[in-house]
């Protein structure tokens, strides 16, 4: 398939996952700030912005600022609206590859966002955040059921998985970073949509070590860092099934594989103590893997530009 | 106060929000301020949104054979911190006394020999079960969960209306109400510090685990429901989900050799604690109603053998009988050597022929309640009853004086409630929930405020057209906040401080280069 199309699909996967994760995180955070009478709104909001890599404004930061910067801002793909816009722009350039249903889901959501924004100003952010999560699930479901599971689909899933690795790691680092104003571990679980499955798995043993273990190492929960790395690795392997006799030729798969084994054979007993190093490594791996995929698969001519010829 | 509350007509009862027409109580200042931008139409619109959210989420109760969204009134009920302290002290005290009473009733019976309460009052209760003798709770707890129904009288004092020590329900609405309110009216919360309620499931689970039979270190807890057709099924499912435990029906359990197991795909797995949400009568067909198909045959023997804990314990009804209720202040003095923090409603026992005669002559001025009723069933409010109802009541009371108590009619406090698109006073009560883990009785901040939606109605049960309100207990100043987090069961472990993760760049993707437009 065309490199350009592959790149578009990869980034559709990433942007939709980002919009989805950001919506989950915001919902859990905003909800917590409202519900917890002792929450320090300013500090919590700043820790959230920092962790999602958004420049902190100099003025006082509250839930409203955070929503503006991380949900409504259409000019940057680190916000929900911006990420969705970017996904839609990518889809527009790959319309012949993705199914019409998928395109429609992406486009209709983009078109509906301004209305949702107005509604959320009236009724609170939950309406918008819920809408985005629903639509992201719909996009993923339509991709799953209406696209051939060929290379294009693999790029989509690869993008989604790498983004998920990054987002879950970032979320976990809120606990490491801003200890005083960090969200509770329960909020972290909610932000990953993992609270209920966690409870069922560990039967109410809500302690930090188990939660870190669940979000980083769990084999069965699809939003854990480990499960997402496995998924990414699988996609990379299927993209280049001929592995040869020794080693791994694909640099991206080497990076992802190393990150995966780094987690797979970790001693769960010391996981919490080593959390900062693990998170740093995982985020670095996600960045490098993305670059390696781009280098390996998305090499094509830079955009042609008209030059003014002198003379 | 003009606008929303402009034509709010206060009645004779204590009003929760206003101390005089147009003069709100201090606890409500911030709510009223936050509601200023809202018109009645806007509130009405949100109320509709809310009932849609509840329908979508399945927050319903079964009424006349159909699933209806539980009506939640958008105007919260606010309780100031100081006042709440009094409620907590009173509820804790009551639960401790009733716990001691049950241990005594199903034990040596000293309370009878000391003449505090006649033995016949207890053993004649239809919820007193001889079968409960010999079932020794592992950590001494019989009342794992209690719901103590409170009302405010005309002077604004909280009084106890009844105790619920069997299967008090309604806590799911407390949790869902708060969730819905923060989603639909976030503006209201920004001006307040309101105690969160989401700690309940972890508290309940901790208490259930603590009650496991001796020697079991990692007990398997289950919630036992009568099934999807039960009116409170939603609550059973919610609690099981939020505790992360199995929701089982009677047919999922099997008793062999005095041990309870559940049927799973991996064979039969042991069960150590059963949080049962069905009445004693249906729990074990071997001992109680033999026609019950929702229970688990043999579970009571397993409990007696000390292999499983039934929560709440069998036979608790002996202590929440409405005739026993009249003795609770004495029980508090007897067991705890304390004066009751919360008073009872003035109640007449009918076993004394003189009292009976006096009551029978004034049925139209009193409230008559069947002693074993729940859900507001069978209550006759004298001043509102018809001649025929009173005649029927007269015969019923005369035939079975042990079956009834008489109380003075209390005008329950009122709270402003959205009715259609205007706001009118409606009567409310309050059911705080207490969880006993054997070391401490913990009271959920807030509890369920039930509203009698028909005008003038005094019975607030959801089966009789009742709704509910989100109940806010205001937190004190941040300086008085708990040192770390709100939840005592907070899952926070050691926090590792290593700010270097901060610097990891984020791959924003090719789209970062072109600005989105819309």
Image (spheres, coloured by chain):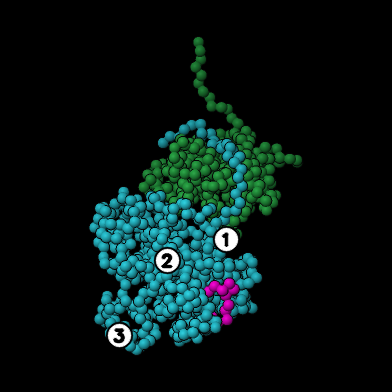
Chain colours: A green, B cyan
Residue at (57, 81) in percent of width and height: B134
Mark 1 crowdedness (10 Å alpha carbons): few <14, some 14-19, many ≥20: many
As measured in the structure, the alpha-carbon distance from the residue carrying label 3 to the one carrying label 2 is 33 Å
Vertical relation: B438 (above or below) A159: below
As measured in the structure, the alpha-carbon distance from the residue carrying label 1 to the one carrying label 3 is 55 Å
Disc 1 + disc 2, Cβ < 8 Å: no
Start and end of the magenta stretch? Answer: B131-142
Q: At numbered mark 3, what does the secondary structure look like: helix, strand or loop?
A: helix
Q: Position of residue B38 (x, y in %)?
A: 31, 51
Q: Position of residue A16 (x, y in %)?
A: 51, 43
Identify residue for label 3: B358
Mark 2 crowdedness (10 Å alpha carbons): few <14, some 14-19, many ≥20: many
The answer as to whether the residues below labels 1 and 2 share one chain is no
Residue at (45, 69) in percent of width and height: B91
Q: Is A85 included in the stretch rendered in magenta?
A: no
Q: Earlier in the sequence, mark 3 or mark 2?
A: 2
Residue at (43, 56) in percent of width and height: B475
Q: Nearer the viewer, mark 1 or mark 3?
A: 3
Question: Which chain is disc 2 placed on?
Answer: B
């Amino acid at each position: 398939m065309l490199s350009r199309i592959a790149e578009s699909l990869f980034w559709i996967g990433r942007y939709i996952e980002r919009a989805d994760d950001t919506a989950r995180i915001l919902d859990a955070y905003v909800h917590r700030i409202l519900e917890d009478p002792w929450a320090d709104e300013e500090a919590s909001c700043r820790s959230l912005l920092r962790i999602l890599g958004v420049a902190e404004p100099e003025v006082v930061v509250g839930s409203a600022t955070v929503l503006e910067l991380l949900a409504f801002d259409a000019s940057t793909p680190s916000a929900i609206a911006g990420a969705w816009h970017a996904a839609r722009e990518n889809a527009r350039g790959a319309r012949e590859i993705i199914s019409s249903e998928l395109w429609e889901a992406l486009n209709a959501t983009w078109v509906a966002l301004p209305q949702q924004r107005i509604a959320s100003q009236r009724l609170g952010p939950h309406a918008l955040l819920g809408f985005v999560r629903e639509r992201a699930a719909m996009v993923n479901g339509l991709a799953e059921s209406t696209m051939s599971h060929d290379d294009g689909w693999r790029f989509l899933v690869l993008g989604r998985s790498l983004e998920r690795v990054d987002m879950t790691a970032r979320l976990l680092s809120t606990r490491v970073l801003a200890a005083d104003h960090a969200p509770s571990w329960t909020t972290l679980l909610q932000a990953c949509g993992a609270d209920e499955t966690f409870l069922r798995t560990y039967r109410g043993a809500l302690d930090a070590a188990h939660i870190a273990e669940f979000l980083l190492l769990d084999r069965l929960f699809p939003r854990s860092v480990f499960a997402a790395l496995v998924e990414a690795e699988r996609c990379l392997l299927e993209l280049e099934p001929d592995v040869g006799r020794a080693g791994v030729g694909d640099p991206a798969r080497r990076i992802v594989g190393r990150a995966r084994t780094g987690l797979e054979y970790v001693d769960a007993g010391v996981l919490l103590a080593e959390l900062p190093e693990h998170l740093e490594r995982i985020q670095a791996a996600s960045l490098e893997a993305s670059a390696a995929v781009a280098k390996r698969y998305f090499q094509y001519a830079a955009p042609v530009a008209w030059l003014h010829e002198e003379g | 106060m003009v606008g929303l509350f402009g034509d709010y007509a206060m009645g004779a009862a204590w009003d929760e929000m206003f101390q005089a027409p147009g003069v709100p109580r201090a606890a409500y200042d911030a709510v009223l301020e936050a509601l200023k931008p809202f018109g009645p139409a806007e509130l009405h619109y949100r109320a509709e949104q809310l009932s849609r959210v509840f329908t979508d989420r399945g927050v319903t109760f079964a009424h006349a054979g159909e699933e209806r969204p539980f009506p939640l009134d958008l105007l919260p009920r606010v309780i100031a911190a100081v006042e709440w302290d009094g409620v907590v002290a009173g509820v804790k005290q009551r639960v401790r006394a009733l716990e001691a009473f049950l241990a005594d009733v199903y034990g040596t019976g000293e309370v009878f020999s000391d003449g505090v309460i006649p033995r016949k009052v207890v053993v004649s209760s239809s919820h007193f079960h001889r079968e409960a003798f010999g079932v020794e709770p592992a950590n001494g707890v019989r009342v794992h969960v209690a719901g103590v129904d409170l009302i405010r009288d005309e002077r604004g004092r909280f009084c106890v209306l009844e105790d619920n020590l069997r299967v008090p329900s309604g806590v799911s609405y407390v949790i869902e109400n708060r969730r819905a309110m923060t989603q639909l009216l976030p503006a209201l919360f920004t001006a307040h510090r309101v105690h969160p309620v989401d700690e309940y499931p972890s508290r309940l689970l901790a208490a259930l685990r603590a009650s496991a039979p001796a020697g079991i270190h990692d007990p398997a807890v289950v919630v036992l429901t009568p099934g999807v057709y039960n009116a409170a099924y939603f609550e059973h499912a919610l609690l099981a989900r939020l505790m992360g435990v199995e929701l089982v029906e009677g047919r999922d359990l099997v008793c062999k050799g005095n041990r309870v197991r559940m049927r799973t795909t991996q064979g039969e797995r042991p069960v150590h604690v059963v949080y049962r949400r069905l009445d004693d009568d249906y729990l074990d067909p071997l001992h109680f109603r033999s026609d019950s198909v929702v229970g688990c045959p043999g579970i009571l023997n397993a409990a007696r053998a000390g292999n499983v804990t039934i929560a709440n314990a069998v036979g608790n009804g002996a202590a929440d009988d409405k005739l026993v209720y009249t003795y609770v202040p004495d029980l508090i003095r007897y067991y705890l050597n304390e004066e009751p923090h919360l008073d009872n409603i003035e109640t007449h026992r009918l076993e004394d022929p003189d009292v009976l005669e006096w009551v029978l002559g004034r049925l139209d001025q009193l409230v008559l309640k069947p002693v074993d009723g729940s859900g507001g069933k069978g209550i006759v409010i004298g001043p509102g009853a018809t001649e025929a109802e009173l005649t029927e009541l007269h015969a019923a009371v005369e035939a079975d004086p042990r079956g009834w108590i008489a109380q003075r009619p209390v005008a329950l406090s009122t709270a402003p409630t959205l009715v259609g698109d205007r706001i009118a006073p409606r009567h409310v009560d309050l059911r705080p929930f207490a969880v006993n883990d054997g070391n401490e009785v913990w009271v959920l901040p807030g509890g369920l405020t039930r509203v009698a939606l028909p005008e003038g109605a005094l019975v607030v049960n959801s089966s009789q057209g009742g709704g509910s309100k989100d109940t806010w207990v205001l937190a004190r100043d941040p300086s008085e906040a708990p040192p770390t987090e709100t939840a005592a069961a907070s899952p926070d472990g050691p926090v590792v401080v290593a700010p270097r993760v901060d610097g990891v760049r984020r791959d924003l993707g090719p789209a970062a280069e072109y600005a989105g437009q819309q």
